[in-house]
Structures are given as C-alpha cells and as structure tokens.
Amino acid sequence: MHELTPGEPGYAELRDEVIATFAPLARRAALKFQNRGEELDDLVQVALVGLIKAVDRFDPSRGIQFVHYAVPTMTGELKRHFRDRAWSVRVNRRLQELHLRIAKAVPELSQRLQRMPSAEDLAEYLGETEEDIQSGLRCAGAYSTRSLSDTVPGSDSTQLAELMGELDQQIEMVPDRLALRGVIGRLPEREQHILKLRFEDNLTQADIADLIGVSQMHVSRLLAKAFAELKEMLVQDD
C-alpha cells in the first residue's frame, strides 16, 4: 500500500482491505473500555476511527509491526473520546483520569477485600490522597446526566421536573428590603409610626386617622411625603 500514493489505482482497495482485516482488533480494543457508561457499538466506532488513522499514518520503514502501532493509536482515540466527549459536564483532565482509575480499581479491590473498598482503601491502592479520591468519586455525577422527564426512583409517576424549585419572589426582594430598612430609620418618628401602622399592622388610612387624631386626607399626605423622602434617600445612597 505504501508503494502507492493516494489516488493511484489499487490504493483505495488495499486501504479498505487493511482496515477490514484489522477491524476485529478494533473491537478487542473497544472491549477493554466497556462497562463505563458507553454503548459497545459506539466504542467500536471510535476504535475504528483510530484504526483508520493508524492505517493512514503507519510508516513501515521504521521497522515495527503494524499491530504494535495500531493498538496504541486506537487506545489513545478511545481515551480521548472518554476525556473530551463522554462527559456531560466538563471536568478537568486529571479528575477524569482519576475517576477512570477508580472505576477500574473498585472491582479489583472488591474481589480482594470481599467488600466494597472505602476511600481510604482506594487511596492506598492508587497512591492518592483520600481527598483526591473523594473528588474523583464526586465527579462521577458529571459523567452522565438524567432527563427531567425521568421518573423519580421509588415513584411510579413523579418526574424529576416536578421536584424543581421555582423562583422565590420574596428572596429576590431581600436586597430592596434591606436597603429600605436602612433608610426608614432616618425618617421623622411620626412618619415611621404611620408607616408601621399602615404596612406592618395593616391598618387602613381611616383607621390610622382615628388612632392619631388627624384627618384621613392628612394621613394620605404624610404617607406620600414619607414615600418621596424614602425614594430620594435610596437614590442618594445608590
């Protein structure tokens, strides 16, 4: 094949023949990465991409057998797939690789210890700190996400979307309330008292007028004045 150049008669046929001959090798490479949340057929396709790259890049003049070049190329392609495309939420490369090492170590340690390995067990086995192991375990949640239409575990019909919170208007008003509280104390005591009666005690203007011995119209004017003063103070503070 390398005695020809792309486009020459016979080149494409030879290339296709090499790819078909080593396609089972691509499947074997993909099998090493199964049980990691990806469909085997998808992994085989990734490995075949690596095989095609190996076929196109292989230089027989270097004196190594093709299989010794193709296997690392396919393995690298599979690792890149898991690193760059398989994660639903992007995690830094070190944590991704640590997560994969943990995933491989868990069944090995489980068989050796006859129980699920703890973070301490994994740290000692992999030569990492417990803190790093905990980080690697936590990032597993970034690998795959669930649809909001999925049913909540243990429920027959409740969907995850039904458990999502809504925007709390009261929380959105907290900054405004804090700012208002800071300037109300600068009003005259009489106006503070009227505001308290109106908005904390929920009295009507008529009730306030009877209580403090003025007309309802005067109460209305006092409230309007208090509002104007508060607005001016809030603008000045901004």
Image (cartoon, grey):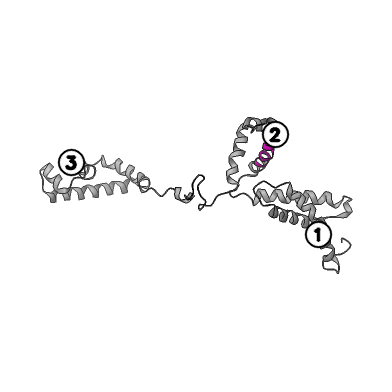
Q: In the image, what residue occupies the spot 68% across and 37% down?
A: 107
Mark-to-mark CA distance, 3 and 2:
78 Å
Q: Identify the mark at residue 221; answer none if there is no mark.
A: none
Q: Residues within 10 Å of mark 3 (few under 14, many from 20)?
A: few
What amino acid is found at the position of numbered circle 2 in the picture?
Gln
Q: Nearer the viewer, mark 2 or mark 1?
A: 2
Using a 10 Å C-alpha cutoff, classify the residue at mark 2 as few (fewer than 14 neighbours), some (14 to 19) or many (20 or more). Answer: few
Q: Which residue is mark 3?
A: 190
Along the line of sight, which residue is nearer the eye, 170 or 100? Answer: 100
Q: Secondary structure at mark 1?
A: helix
**Residue at image point 87% right, 54% down:** 60
Are there few (<14), some (14-19), or many (20+) residues within 10 Å of tag 1? Answer: few
Residue 111 is marked as 2
Q: Which residues are magenta?
A: 98-111
Pointer 3 with pointer 2, Cβ within 8 A: no
Residue plotted at (83% across, 49% down): 68
Q: CA distance from mark 2 to mark 1?
A: 38 Å
Count of all numbered marks drawn on residues in the image = 3
- Residue 20 is tagged as 1
Q: Is residue 170 magenta?
A: no
**Sequence-earlier tag: 3 or 2:** 2
Callout 2 secondary element: helix
The percent position of residue 81, horizontal first and vertical second, equals 68, 51
Q: Is residue 198 left or right of residue 126?
A: left
Give the mark nearest the N terminus, 1 or 3.
1
Q: Which is in the foreground here, disc 1 or disc 3?
A: 1
Quadrant location, the N terminus: bottom right
**Quick one: 124 or 209, which is closer to the camera?**
124
